[in-house]
Amino acid sequence: MRLDPLVIILDQDFKLEKKFYFISGNEKTFIERIKTRIIDKYKRENSVSILKIESFNDYVDETSLFENKKIILINNCKEIDNDILDRVRNSGNIFIFAQENSQKTRKAKNIFLQDKDSYLMNCYELDKSSKIKILNEYIKSTGLKIEDDVYWFLIEKLDSKYAFLENSLNKISSLKHEDATLFNIKNILTIDSSGKEKVLFKLYKNNKEIVRAYREKIITTADVNEFFYYCKSFCQLIIDSKNEEDYSKKIPVYLFKEKGFLIDFYRKYNSKKKEMLLGLLSSTEKILRRESDLSLISGLRFFLSLKKITIS
């Protein structure tokens, strides 16, 4: 059955009552956030472990009475049919599929749409109505009091990509109530920290130059989170790609000038280094969530560690 993904974002008490969660659409940051929210809620309420596989062909049901429930993250839905779902329906595991829209997802979407044990969530860029819902919930949960002109400025200014909208709200959360004026919020949301993503392409520079570039562009906790997510997206692409051709096809068209760097980035990774990279991403994400006050240092430490793994 279909579920509005905003329910997962806005409802703190949403029920995890399904066996299968299929998250798709064309907005990668929204897809990623929904997946993370579902995983985090399961972790809070149950003793679970995470298993990542490429497709159902790689899944082996080893559930036992003495084993924790598993969340199975599946990248590719191409083998999905009703028989496969029925085969694992009675297992104790939960299955999450996260894949951007393509011709391959159409069949799977129809299957999950009709399945009573499934939630199908389509994640697209946020429209005005969605921004209003998100901002209203943010104001309610934080108790922030703002004037009408500030409210409608935010509706217009907030990004349609979820990760960037969330980062903007995180920046605003640093303000005291009396400082939440239109002037101050305009200044916060127009800080010249553009080009954060370009720090990634300094990866092969000496450490002194990397530190200088990082300090120029990564200024706030929100900047760290945005920069980490940007790096993580390419790291995850390296981990998930079957080969160089597969990887190359997934590089965004707008990065045509950096394609040579990104291909070289991929070539430096073998299976052992991919495991190290996965460990770095996991440990850094935990640190950023736990130690927000140290996020600027943690972000830099992550990037220097990424360099070390890459060139080793």
Image (cartoon, grey):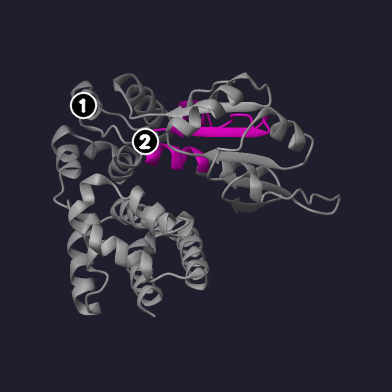
Quickly name the residue at label 1. 156
Disc 1 on helix, strand or loop? helix
What residue sits 55% from the left and 33% below the top? 22
In the image: residue 273, left or right of residue 57: left
Q: Quadrant of residue 177?
A: top left
Q: Is 184 placed above or below 192 here?
A: above
Disc 2 on helix, strand or loop? loop
Quarter of the image with the N terminus in it: top right
What residue sits 64% from the left and 44% below the top? 56
What residue sits 70% from the left and 45% below the top? 46
Is there CB contact under 8 Å for labels 1 and 2?
no
- What amino acid is at disc 1? Glu
Quarter of the image with the C terminus in it: bottom left
Q: Residues within 10 Å of mark 2 (few under 14, many from 20)?
A: some
Instruction: Depth check: give the residue in front, 201 or 298.
Output: 201
Residue 298 visible? The answer is no
The x and y percentages for residue 174 are 30, 46
Q: Quadrant of residue 168?
A: top left
Quickly name the residue at label 2. 27
**Residue found at the far right of this picture:** 65
Residue 133 visible? The answer is yes
Instruction: Depth check: give the residue in front, 258 or 245.
Output: 245
The x and y percentages for residue 154 are 23, 29
Front tag of 1 and 2: 2
Q: Is 99 placed above or below 109 here?
A: below
In the image: residue 19, left or right of residue 282: right
In the image: residue 93, left or right of residue 277: right
Mark closest to the chain's N terminus, 1 or 2: 2
Magenta residues, start to end:
6-35
